[in-house]
Amino acid sequence: MAGEIAVTKRLMLLTDVGFLVYFSVTGLGLVPAAWAFADYTNPLMVAWNWSFLWIDLLASATGLLSLHLLRRGVRDAGQLMLVSLVLTSASGLMAVAFWTLRGDFSLAWWIPNLYLLLFPLPAILRLTGLTRRIYRD
């Protein structure tokens, strides 16, 4: 499994650390106005943004722990990796759905959220065995 998910592991590390950096920067109020999403200071939008904290922190914690366990050779670490990847993809899907409903198509926010939605999918298919079943049938 280690060889076939090497790219996913690097992307997970980048993403999971990125979640922690994003919420740290946001919490400290360091997001430049030019980079902020539409209505960034609206209290409802602030609440919406912070509503992602728990899913993103859980994705980050399970992802970083799974990467640590994989390095140590723990056999079932892939199951924890799967949890992290599903949470990450769900976070991206929630954001993309929200921006779609608002009709807000800023690439500055769509690109990172499409990344969160899509990068986990190949590894999710591999970890669940779906790719073997699709190609076998």
Image (cartoon, helix red, strand yellow):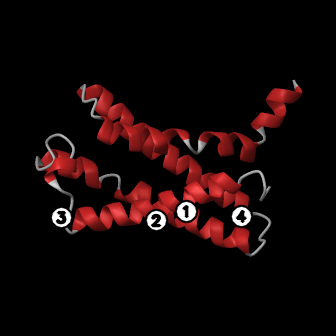
Query: What type is the residue that disc 2 sits on?
Result: Val
Q: CA distance from mark 2 to mark 1?
A: 6 Å
Q: CA distance from mark 1 to mark 4?
A: 15 Å
Residue furthest bottom as drawn:
72
Query: Helix, strand or loop at disc 1?
Result: helix
Q: Residue at x 21, y 51 (%)?
A: 47
Left or right: where 2 falls relative to 96: right
Tell me which label, 2 or 3, sits earlier in the chain: 2
Residue 28 % position (x, y): 21, 69
Residue 26 % position (x, y): 25, 61
Query: What type is the residue that disc 4 sits on?
Result: Ala
Occupied quadrant, residue 2: bottom right
Occupied quadrant, residue 9: bottom right
Query: Helix, strand or loop at disc 4?
Result: helix
Q: Residue at x 21, y 58 (%)?
A: 31
Q: Residue at x 39, y 66 (%)?
A: 20
Q: Residue at x 36, y 65 (%)?
A: 21
Against 18, is 85 above or below? above
Q: CA distance from mark 3 to mark 1?
A: 24 Å
Q: Which residue is mark 1?
A: 13
Label number found at residue 29: 3
Q: Are marks 4 and 3 in contact (CB under 8 Å)?
A: no
Q: CA distance from mark 4 to mark 3?
A: 35 Å
Query: What type is the residue that disc 1 sits on?
Result: Leu
Q: Which residue is mark 2?
A: 17
Q: Are marks 1 and 4 in contact (CB under 8 Å)?
A: no
Label 1 environment density (alpha carbons within 10 Å; few <14, some 14–19, many ≥20): some
Q: CA distance from mark 2 to mark 3?
A: 18 Å
Query: Helix, strand or loop at disc 3?
Result: loop
Left or right: where 102 falls relative to 33: right
